[in-house]
Image (cartoon, rainbow, N blue to C red):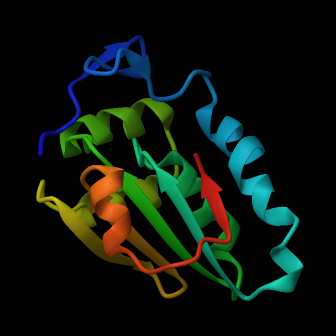
Amino acid sequence: MKNANLSFKGQIPFNEEFGDIYFNTDKPLLESEFVFASALDEIWQSKDSFIVAETGFGAGLNFFTLCKKFKTSSKNLHFVSIEKSPIKKEDLLKIYENLGIFKAYAKKLVSLYPPLISGIHRINFAPNITLDLCYGEADQILPELDFAADIWFL
């Protein structure tokens, strides 16, 4: 298990191993909200609890976007994310500083961020928000998990 090997193209984090950026706009939270948070809108009224799963936690922007949606709600979020190469805490701090995003969320995530040990790390992020941050290969982690996602972010 190893951390992501990042460099920065301006303020955009770039994964050297995969030769790809983590997000591609100057307003990635708006991009995440448009693409992912809107996916819940179709089923929002019909459920009180949601399980959202994704492959590739990255900097956690999709998670933060959903935290914003659930912050003032009595509904529950269980967010399951599988990450092969977690970003180092110091790189996360740089990403969050550059984006000026959700400082309270960013600070809390960094303080609870699990060590670089493969497996499932449960984080009780808020009374109604649980994050299962799963470190490892998706094909090895998925058989260990028992859930039915309402929505998958791929």
Q: Nearer the viewer, residue 123 or 104?
A: 123
Relative height, residue 50 to residue 1 (above, below) = below
Q: Nearer the viewer, residue 19 or 88?
A: 19
The residue shown at (42%, 49%) is 57
Percent from the top left, x then y, of residue 123? 33, 75
Res 64 → quadrant: bottom right
Q: Is residue 66 left or right of residue 43?
A: left
Res 15 → quadrant: top left
Q: Is residue 78 left or right of residue 9?
A: right
Mark count: 0
Percent from the top left, x then y, of residue 73? 71, 81
Relative height, residue 39 to residue 97 (above, below) = below
Q: Is residue 126 left or right of residue 45?
A: left
Res 122 → quadrant: bottom left
Percent from the top left, x then y, of residue 125? 41, 75
Visible residue check, residue 53: yes
Q: Residue furthest top?
A: 9
The residue shown at (42%, 45%) is 56
The residue shown at (64%, 29%) is 27
User: Considering the image in quadrants, where does the C terminus appear?
Assistant: top right
Visible residue check, residue 108: no
Percent from the top left, x then y, of residue 152? 62, 58
